[in-house]
Amino acid sequence: MTILDALIPPRGLKVLVTAGASGIGAGIARAFATAGAHVHVCDIDPAALDRLATRQQGITTSTADASVERDVALVFDDVRGTLGGLDVLVNNAGISGPTGPIESLEPAQWERTVAVNLNSQFLFARHAVPLLRQSRSSPCVIAMSSVAGRLGYPLRTPYAASKWAIVGLMKSLAIELGPAGVRVNAILPGPVAGERMDGVIAARAASLGQSVEATRDSYLRQSSMRRMVEVDDVAALALFLCAPGARNLSGQAISVDGNLEYL
Ligand code: NAD
C-alpha cells in the first residue's frame, strides 16, 4: 500500500448513515457509495429517501424516526438483511431545535431536540456495537456533533447541550471499544451552506430583530476563513476517518469549520 492509498477507505465497507436522505448525511452516503462502499441510509422522510436512492445507485434505505427505539431496531433488521453486517456507523441525525432565550423555550422543544440529537446516537450505537465488534475492516463510529459542541451557543441552548453531550458519549465509547478494535470519533462542522442554515439564519434574524443579510454576514465574520462549510468538506473527513491512515485516530472531536472563533 502506498501512502496515497492510506487516504481513502477500502472498497466494500458496510456503512449505515442515519438521517441521510438529504443534507450532510446524503453527502456522506454518496461519498461512501462513490468510494465503493455498501451504504444503507435511514431517514424519517420516505420521499427524500426515494430521491436519494434514485440519484445514487446501490444505496438501500429504511424509513425510521431516529429517536424511536422500535424504529431503530427495525433499521438493524434491514441492515442485517441488506448489508449482512456493519463496519461503519455514521450517527448523523440531528435537528436544529428551537431558537430563543431559555425562558421562552418549551420543555417539549428541549426534549425533542435531545431525543433526536442525543438519544438517537445512543440507540444506534447500542444496536451497532455487536456488529462492529465482528467487523474485520477497521470498524468505526462517526458521531456528528457541531461547532456548538465546542463553543457556547446563545439562543440555541438545547442544540448546544445535545452536541456537547455527543462529544462525551464519543470519548467514553472510544475508551470502551478501543480494545475491541473499534474507533470512535466526532465531526464538528461549522455552519454548512444549504437549506438548513438558511432556516437557522432566518430564525436568528427574527429572534435578534435584525435583517437576514446582516445575520448571514455576521455568521461569515465568525469564521477565520470567512466562508461557510460545504457538505463535501464534511464528507471528505468522514471518508478519511475510515481510511487506513486514520487507524490510530480515535476519541477525537474534529472541527471542520474554517476556524469558527465564536458563535
Ligand atoms: P438537515 O436538517 O438537512 O436534515 C437531514 C435529514 O434529517 C433530513 O433528510 C430529515 O428528513 C432527517 N431527519 C430529521 N429528523 C429526523 C428523525 N427524527 N429521524 C430520522 N431522520 C430525521 O440536517 P443537516 O444540516 O444535514 O445536519 C446533519 C447533522 O449535521 C445534524 O446532526 C446537524 O446537527 C449536524 N450539523 C449541521 C450543520 C449545518 O450547518 N447544517 C452544522 C453543524 C452540525
Image (cartoon, rainbow, N blue to C red):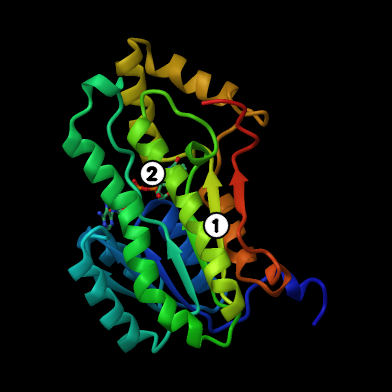
Residue at (34, 75) in percent of width and height: 127
Secondary structure at numbered mark 1: helix
Query: Circle 1: is it few (<14), some (14-19), or many (20+) Cα within 10 Å?
Result: some
Q: Say if mark 1 contacts mark 2, CB within 8 Å.
A: no
> Do we see residue 240 in this rendering?
yes
Nearest the viewer among 160 and 66 is 160
Residue 94 place in picture, x, y as percent: 35, 49
Picture coordinates of residue 253 (x, y %)? 59, 51
Q: Nearer the viewer, mark 1 or mark 2?
A: 1
Q: Which residue appears at 66% of the width and 72% of the height? A: 243
Between 152 and 219, which is closer to the camera in this rendering? Answer: 152
Check mark 2 vs ligand 1: CB closer than 8 Å? yes or no: no
Q: Mark 2 or mark 1, which is nearer the start of the sequence?
A: 2
Using residue 76 as the reference point, say whether residue 178 is left or right of it.
right
Q: Distance of mark 1 from mark 2, alpha carbons?
A: 15 Å
**Residue receiving disc 2:** 162
Q: Is residue 259 above or below residue 114?
A: above
Quadrant of residue 171 in the image? bottom right
Residue named by callout 1: 171
Residue under the point 39% across and 85% down: 83
Q: Nearer the viewer, residue 77 or 59?
A: 77
In the rendered structure, find residue 41 and report the number of the disc placed on it.
none
Please identify the residue farthest to the right as the structure is shown. Answer: 2
